Amino acid sequence: EELLEESGGGLVEVGGSLRLSCITAGFTFSNTYMSWLRQAPGKGLEWVSGINYWGGSRDYADSVQGRFAISRDNAKRTLYLQMNSLKTEDTAMYYCATGKYEWPSRGRGTQVIVSS
């Protein structure tokens, strides 16, 4: 069974920063493209960022480009998302997931609330 568990969410003011983590188990993390997704209240699931298996290729949605940074530690089986210059529109539940265009496995999410 593939397990993914996010942490690091919370309440932050506009302009602040948070670092999300996702610890994984049950699959070969070091061979897997990983993504961060988010879902804002009343909206659909949105892809935020992705990283290839060794970290050499990183992709971002236009809405977070230049503010968010994805990274991974294969030895720790952990995925990260550093979020800077947060905006109210970044408020959402954040999920880590396996895959690039489809996400067969994802965690339960961690809530991020950006207040003005």
Image (tube, rainbow, N blue to C red):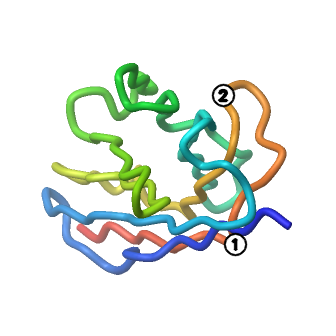
**Which mark is on residue 95?**
none
Distance from label 2 to label 1 (Cα)?
Answer: 18 Å
SS assignment at label 2: loop
Up the image or down, 46 lies above or below 7; here it is: above
Residue at (59, 47) in percent of width and height? 37
Q: Residue at x 13, y 56 (%)?
A: 15
* N-terminal label among 2 and 1: 2
Q: Decide which of 52, 37 is in the foreground and name it.
A: 52
Residue nearer the viewer, 7 or 91 = 7
The percent position of residue 107, horizontal first and vertical second, equals 68, 66
Tell me which residue sits at (43%, 23%) in the image: 59
Image coords of residue 88 (percent x, y): 34, 56
Left or right of 104 on screen, residue 72: left
Q: Nearer the viewer, residue 28 or 64?
A: 28
Number of numbered callouts drawn:
2
Residue 115, located in which quarter of the rendered image?
A: bottom left
Query: Which label was assigned to residue 100?
Result: 2
In the rendered view, does 12 fall on the left or right side of 3?
left
